[in-house]
Image (tube, rainbow, N blue to C red):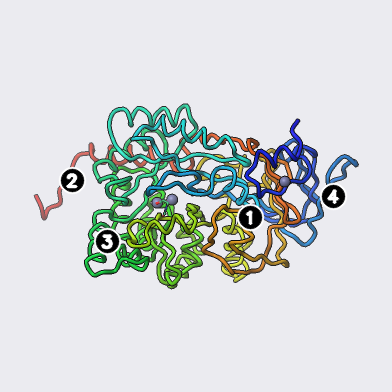
């Protein structure tokens, strides 16, 4: 068995180590308010061998059990971040946080699982998958994979099937932006949507019109606007609204569910709201940067961070159910990497942090402000993600038999964010200086206390890959809609008097 000092040497140098992560396999969390998406109650939670073994009042245990007092605190499922980019090769560089540092940061902020995007290697899905299996070997918490589709041919189509049937991937992302790099055209998107549907895999889109963004960028350069302010100006909300509408309509045409990643504008949210009102299965994922920041910080990510009215509207979308869950799009670069675009905003690597901050900022912004209930908080930070990606109730719940991924949040304590004290490797933090109410005091990952007293106790290699099976709940009934449609086409055509 490894001892703590070996973890330090195997790690990246900053991670504080305490006792061996394997020292106690039995934990009792006493007297807290246990919150699930459907219900909350005061109860004890007993954990054995990484699994939740009991949830009820007044559990009695022996001396060998580690007891954590949660009186006056919330005991909730650990956060699941549906959208991260750890160790991703992107825009002539690589994101700074890898599967160890990014996950350590996540755990320090109460997130116990994330789903990262595998980027194919020269269009090859299997090569991309292998590369990410390597990257993820240093994981210290559980993770899953989405996969990007960046080109189309018979091999890609066949490999999608392998990914779903053999590799535990149930979602594919299509980029409608990043012209000349990751962008796909409508023909490819249609092929991809059809293939996703046939596999019971969820199609995800980055919705911005890449051709128009390219035009917008030229416009800015011609006007002599080369600084970071040119980024948001070159790709206004209308281009996000257009691509969101197009993707929604094409998914409706194919009759397959659709997941819109990083919804950043009212324009995009309105399209999602209209589609949902019409009964279409469309999921909208805002990210924490888009909810709480405004464009005055000149933080470059895509779609861009908008003026503050958009963030406020997205918060409203979350509280009313137009949007269903919150991600981060954690894609960290340091100031040297960001400086690649010092003379030309088009070369600034796109992306901001958030994996460590999401749980705190969503609590403060949404719960502390009174916009949502604590049960809704659990739903939008954890449970809904687990349901959509078909790993509920193993993840996303405090139920007997679920994985013991648990946080204890003290609503009367406060958090502060700074680039000097955070656990990301970056020297910058887009939320630097923010403070708020509510603090994740304890994080338990698979039954191990990995965050307590502001100390991380994590081991590279302890995280596990979570396979995500196809045909999640969003696919229920899709076949019935299809067969009703087909029988309506086959039915004798009725002509009205006016047209006959
Ligand atoms: O700016 C962003 N969002 N960077 C990460 C890649 C993506 O589009 O999700
Ligand atoms: Zn140490
Ligand atoms: Zn994207
Ligand atoms: Zn992303």
How far is the residue under mark 4 from the one under mark 2?
Answer: 68 Å
Residue drawn at (46%, 30%), measured in percent from left and top?
130
Q: Which residue is mark 2?
A: 494
Looking at the rendered structure, the secondary structure element under dot 2 is loop
For this rendering, which residue is in front, 470 or 92? 92
- Mark 1 or mark 3: name the one nearer the start of the chain: 1
Q: Earlier in the sequence, mark 3 or mark 2?
A: 3
Q: Residue at x 51, y 60 (%)?
A: 288
Query: Camera-side residue: 471 or 446?
Result: 446
Q: Dot 1: within a 10 Å radius of its alpha carbon, few (fewer than 14), some, or many (20 or more) residues?
A: many
Question: In x, y percent, where is residue 85?
Answer: 48, 47
Residues at marks 3 and 2, CA–CA distance in whole angstroms: 52 Å
Q: Residues within 10 Å of mark 4 (few under 14, many from 20)?
A: few
What element does badge 4 sit on? loop
- Which label sits in the foreground, 1 or 3? 3
Classify 10 Å Cα crowding around label 2: few (below 14), some (14-19), many (20 and above): few
Q: Are marks 3 and 2 in contact (CB under 8 Å)?
A: no
Please state the total of marks drawn on the protein image: 4
Residue 47 placement (x, y as % from top left):
76, 41
Of tags 4 and 2, which is closer to the observer? 4
Q: Is residue 155 left or right of residue 90?
A: left
CB of mark 1 within 8 Å of CB of mark 2?
no
491 lies above or below 413: above
State whether residue 305 is above or below residue 1.
below
* Tag 3 residue: 217
What distance separates the C-alpha of mark 3 from that of mark 4? 62 Å
Q: Quadrant of the N terminus?
A: top right
| Residue pointed to by mark 4 | 58
Q: Residue furthest right?
A: 63
**Which residue shows up at 52% across the image and 37% down it?**
135
Q: Which residue is mark 1?
A: 109
Closer to the chain start, of discs 1 and 2, is 1
């Amino acid at each position: 068995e490894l001892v703590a000092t070996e973890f330090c040497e195997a790690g990246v140098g900053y991670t504080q180590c305490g006792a061996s992560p394997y020292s106690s396999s039995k934990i009792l969390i006493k007297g807290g308010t246990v919150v699930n998406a459907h219900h909350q109650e005061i109860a004890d939670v007993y954990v054995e061998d990484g699994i939740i073994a009991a949830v009820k009042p007044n559990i009695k245990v022996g001396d060998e059990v580690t007891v954590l007092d949660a009186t006056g605190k919330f005991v909730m499922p650990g956060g699941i971040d549906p959208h991260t980019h750890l160790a991703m090769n992107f825009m002539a560089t690589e994101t700074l946080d890898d599967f160890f540092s990014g996950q350590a940061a996540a755990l320090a902020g109460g997130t116990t699982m994330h789903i990262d995007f595998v980027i194919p290697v020269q269009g090859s899905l299997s090569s991309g998958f292998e590369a990410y299996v390597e990257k993820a070997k240093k994981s210290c918490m559980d993770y899953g994979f989405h996969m990007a589709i960046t080109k189309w041919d018979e091999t890609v189509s066949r490999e999608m099937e392998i990914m779903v049937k053999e590799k535990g991937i149930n979602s594919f992302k299509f980029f409608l932006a990043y012209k000349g790099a990751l962008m796909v055209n409508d023909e490819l998107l249609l092929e991809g949507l059809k293939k996703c549907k046939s596999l019971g895999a969820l199609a995800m889109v980055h919705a911005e019109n890449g051709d128009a963004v390219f035009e917008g960028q030229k416009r800015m350069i011609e006007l002599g606007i080369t600084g970071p302010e040119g980024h948001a100006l070159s790709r206004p909300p209308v281009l996000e609204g257009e691509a969101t509408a197009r993707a929604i309509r094409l998914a409706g045409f194919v009759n397959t569910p659709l997941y819109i990643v990083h919804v950043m504008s009212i324009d995009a949210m309105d399209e999602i709201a209209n589609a949902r009102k019409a009964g279409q299965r469309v999921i909208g994922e805002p990210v924490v940067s888009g909810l709480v920041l405004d464009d005055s910080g000149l933080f470059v990510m895509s779609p861009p961070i908008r003026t503050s009215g958009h963030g406020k509207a997205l918060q409203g979308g979350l509280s009313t159910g137009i949007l269903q869950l919150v991600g981060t799009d954690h894609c960290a670069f340091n100031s040297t990497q960001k400086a690649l675009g010092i003379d030309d905003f088009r070369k600034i690597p796109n992306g901001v942090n958030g994996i460590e901050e999401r749980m705190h900022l969503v609590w403060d912004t949404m719960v502390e402000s009174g916009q949502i209930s604590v049960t809704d908080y659990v739903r939008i930070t954890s449970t809904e993600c687990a349901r959509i990606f078909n790993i509920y109730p193993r993840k996303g719940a405090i139920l007997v038999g679920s994985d013991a991924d648990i946080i204890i949040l003290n609503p009367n304590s406060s958090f502060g964010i700074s680039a000097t004290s955070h656990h990301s490797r970056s020297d910058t933090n887009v939320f630097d200086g923010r403070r708020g109410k509510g603090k994740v005091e304890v994080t338990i990952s698979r039954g191990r206390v990995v965050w307590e007293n502001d100390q991380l106790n994590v081991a590279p290699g302890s995280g596990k890959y979570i396979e995500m099976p196809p045909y999640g709940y969003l696919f229920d009934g899709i076949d019935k809609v299809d067969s009703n449609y087909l029988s309506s086409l086959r039915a004798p055509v009725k002509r009205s008097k006016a047209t006959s």
